[in-house]
């Protein structure tokens, strides 16, 4: 299991992931410095917010693309089949893979946290960085599950992007579904009820990623231990859910 | 058929008959129970977590044009369109309605100006200014901010934007009941007559406002000028203006005392 995780870490280093992550940090910091240079006021806040938003999106993209390409290579090179031929239960294979990808996510998250420390007070940066790392772990696990279930990298990547957008927007969608706008425009009836009910149902099975790594946390001291605790709880439950789905798919899959 | 092609056909056949999934009995029962359990925990935790709360966020200050251009990544028109929608929906944030009266109109004007600068051919911000922000029930000073924004934007593209200033003149006349302001806007609109193909109603707007102000002499001069210049080619327009003049001269209008706006001669 741990050997598998080590292999993934080595793969990440050989893929020049570290350089890519450093480039991302440099790009995000440069953009934020440039934007704050033209700001009339609150330049530091603008710098932190811009860097936070760009880093968050960039880190998620980096993690998801790495996991997708790595898993695709495993599937097309038949290295997964080689591993299955070893006296290793399938669950150990999956846990090893997930540990490896979680370690890569943690490395990317640590780099982002280190750059956030240059822009915001350390307490705010740590809260932001920890929740960002948790978000990256959730996204890495989702990518693994998609690849195992869907087997097609393009479909898996699109599904991952759709999941991410939906998970970040779900709270707003839910509020809109219950809000005055829909109530004023939609005719009361089955369709309206189905829409509201469907949104609520979807919210039950999605993580609230809007409660993770918000860039505003780097600007204002509004998040603390409670936010980290909530994010940790959500991440643990959701990673367990995704891992179990991936495990069931892995057991059913005929290589 | 060569041996090679026979081999490929055979391999394809084997592949086609190999199911991609194994039966459910290959999945350990523990994994299935774990799936059910974790799914229940996820649903339960989502239900227990604090529901999303609606908060009304204040309208942020518009960024400088260079920053917006940079953010547009070479797509200023697309960004302008999206910003228009975002600004329009700002009063209706998820889960909450913000009355227009509590909007910061100077910021609204800055955002409208920004979207107009990003997409100078777009009419959306001008329409929003006149038909939305200046037409809803808000204080008159807020309406004036919007009308002023429209008036300032007209010199940028009079051919396309005069109609919004005509709207602004009507709002000044009926909603603000500020006839001098309506006249000022109507004069700007009428001044475009030489360069732009104005409809009769827009060209005659100045005459109508002056009539409401009971400026009988000024109306006579204007109508006379239009007739002499050969601008009154439409019989219905000539008839309408003649009736208006007759109505004003009949004595119902006291010079210098504005009459009730909007009285159209029958």
Image (spheres, rainbow, N blue to C red):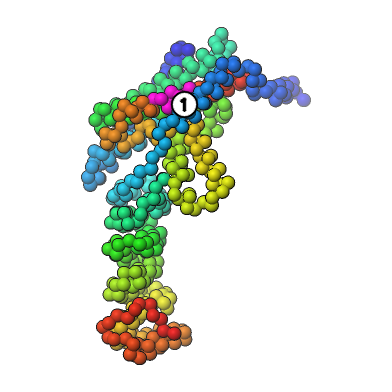
Which quadrant of the figure contains the C terminus of chain A? top right
Q: Is mark 1 on a helix, strand or loop?
A: helix
For disc 1, the marked residue is A238
Whole-percent x, y for residue B245 in the image: 37, 88
Residue A73 visible in the shown view: no
Residue range corresponding to the magenta coloring: A232-241
As rendered, which of A87 and B43 lies closer to the eye? B43
Most frequent secondary structure within the magenta stretch: helix
Residue drawn at x 27%, y 36% is A220
Residue drawn at x 48%, y 16% is A96
Name, please, the residue furthest toward the right. B1
Whole-percent x, y for residue B72 in the image: 37, 47
Question: Could you classify mark 1 by the number of other residues whose Cα lies within 10 Å: few (under 14), some (14-19), or many (20 or more)?
Answer: many
Q: Decide: is A240 above or below A189.
A: above
Q: Decide: is A84 above or below A149.
A: above
Instruction: Choose top left, top right, bottom left or bottom right for residue B150.
Output: bottom left
Whole-percent x, y for residue B101 in the image: 32, 57
On whether residue A137 falls in the magenta region, the answer is no
Residue drawn at x 39%, y 75% is B202
Residue drawn at x 44%, y 46% is A179
Residue A177 visible in the shown view: yes
Whole-percent x, y for residue A176 in the image: 45, 45
As rendered, which of B61 and A101 lies closer to the eye? B61
B100 sits to left or right of A243: left
């Amino acid at each position: 299991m741990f050997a598998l995780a080590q292999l993934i870490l080595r793969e990440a280093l050989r893929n020049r992931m570290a350089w890519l992550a450093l480039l991302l940090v440099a790009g995000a910091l440069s953009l934020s410095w440039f934007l704050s240079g033209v700001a009339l006021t609150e330049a530091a806040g603008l710098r932190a917010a811009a860097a936070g938003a760009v880093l968050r999106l960039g880190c998620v993209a980096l993690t998801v693309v790495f996991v997708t390409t790595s898993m695709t290579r495993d599937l097309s090179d038949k290295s997964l089949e080689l591993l299955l031929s070893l006296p290793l239960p399938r669950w150990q294979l999956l846990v090893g893979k997930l540990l490896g990808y979680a370690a890569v996510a943690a490395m990317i998250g640590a780099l982002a946290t280190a750059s956030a420390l240059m822009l915001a007070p350390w307490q705010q940066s740590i809260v932001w960085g920890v929740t960002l790392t948790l978000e990256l772990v959730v996204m890495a696990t989702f990518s693994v599950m998609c690849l195992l279930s869907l087997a097609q990298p393009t479909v898996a990547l699109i599904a991952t992007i759709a999941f991410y957008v939906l998970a970040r927007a779900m709270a707003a969608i839910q509020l809109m579904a219950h809000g005055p706008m829909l109530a004023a425009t939609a005719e009361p009836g089955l369709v309206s009820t189905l829409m509201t009910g469907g949104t609520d149902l979807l919210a039950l099975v999605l993580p609230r990623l809007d409660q993770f790594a918000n860039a505003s946390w780097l600007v204002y001291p509004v998040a603390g231990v409670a936010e980290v605790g909530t994010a940790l709880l959500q991440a643990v439950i959701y990673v367990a859910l995704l891992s179990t789905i991936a495990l069931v798919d892995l057991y059913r899959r005929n290589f | 058929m060569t041996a090679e092609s026979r081999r490929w056909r055979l391999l394809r056949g084997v592949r086609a008959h190999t199911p991609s999934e194994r039966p459910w009995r290959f999945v350990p029962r523990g994994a299935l129970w774990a799936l059910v359990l974790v799914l229940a925990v996820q649903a339960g935790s989502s239900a227990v977590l604090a529901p999303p709360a609606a908060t009304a966020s204040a309208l942020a200050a518009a960024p400088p044009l260079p920053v917006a251009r940079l953010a547009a990544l070479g797509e200023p028109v697309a960004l302008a369109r999206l910003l228009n929608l975002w600004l329009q929906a700002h009063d209706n944030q998820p889960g909450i309605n913000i009355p227009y009266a509590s909007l910061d109109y100077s910021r609204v004007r800055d955002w409208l100006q920004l979207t107009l600068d990003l997409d100078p051919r777009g009419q959306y911000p001008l329409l929003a200014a006149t038909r939305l922000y200046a037409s809803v029930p808000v204080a008159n000073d807020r309406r004036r901010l919007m009308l002023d924004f429209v008036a300032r934007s007209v010199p940028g593209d009079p051919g396309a934007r005069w109609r919004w200033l005509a709207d602004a003149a009507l709002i000044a006349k009926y909603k603000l009941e500020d006839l001098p302001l309506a006249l000022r806007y109507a004069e700007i609109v009428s001044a475009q007559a030489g360069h732009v193909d104005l409809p009769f109603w827009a060209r005659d707007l100045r005459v109508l406002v002056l009539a409401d102000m009971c400026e009988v002499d000024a109306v006579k001069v204007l109508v006379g000028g239009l007739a002499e210049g050969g601008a009154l080619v439409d019989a219905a327009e000539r008839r309408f203006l003649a009736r208006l003049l007759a109505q004003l001269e009949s004595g119902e209008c006291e010079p210098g005392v504005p009459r009730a706006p909007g009285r159209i001669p029958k």
